[in-house]
Image (cartoon, rainbow, N blue to C red):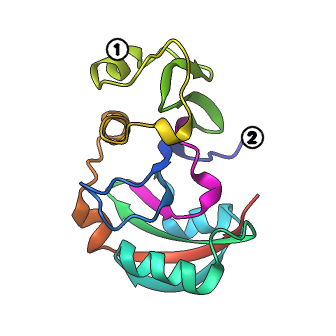
Amino acid sequence: MSEDHGHDCSHHRLPVVRGTFPDLAEAYCITLVHEVSPADLLRRLGGRAEPAHTGIPALVEAAYDSYAPFSGTRTLFGMTTIGPWTLMYDNSNANNDGSFLCTENTDQRLQFDLRDAGHRYGSHPDEFLDVIRRLGFEFPEEPTTTDDLDTDLAVPAAFALAEHLTQVRLTPTHLQDTAFVCGSAEIN
């Protein structure tokens, strides 16, 4: 019998969005996991409980003060629930690759670089192609570099795609005023 690993269909790693979410770290990863509690997610990640923090600014400060997020060994992350979803925020530089990932029960259904939605991977790479196009993702002839990522277009499109897939609309309140259950884990 296989273990249900939860539905994680909005994991996206992308650079900072200063306009909508000004307090995000320079590198971050937002993950939404369906029907897995923060405690269970922490257990599945092999993490340990850490003191709670309210809002992303406090979480980012704690991560920098305690875990040197760019050291590549351990990361601090915060988790909160939004309906049946657990939102996990971590500002580890290891995740700053500008990609969107949708998995379901360990099946990587869709992954693509925010700079080049024309090259999608996974078991169902075209399942949301119409939505991806409608949201304005780029389909360039040649991929660009991370530094060329147009955060004015790609990042809001990633948030909109996550909302389409999960029905969870992230707002600044979710990230600035929320009490986060915190944990830390080794970075693989």
Q: Residues within 10 Å of mark 2 (few under 14, many from 20)?
A: few
Numbered label attached to residue 103: none
Residue extent of the magenta highlight: 85-102
* Residue of label 1: 130
Residue 50 pos. (x, y %):
57, 84
Vertical order, 79 against 112 (above or below): below
Q: Is residue 59 magenta?
A: no
Identify which residue is drawn at 40% across, 22% down. 138
Q: Secondary structure at mark 2?
A: loop
Which quarter shows the N terminus? top right
Find the distance from the CA under tag 2 to the CA under tag 1.
35 Å
Could you tell me residue 12's position as x and y percent? Answer: 49, 44
In the shown orientation, is residue 160 left or right of residue 85? left
| Residue 1 image label | 2
Q: Quadrant of residue 39?
A: bottom right
Task: Name the amino acid type tagged 1.
Answer: Asp
The image position of residue 40, as x and y in percent, is 58, 65
Query: Dot 1, how many residues are within 10 Å of its Cα: few (below 14), some (14-19), or many (20+)?
Result: few
22 or 184, which is in the foreground?
A: 22
Q: How many marks?
A: 2
Identify the residue at horizontal 50%, vertical 67% (top origin): 38
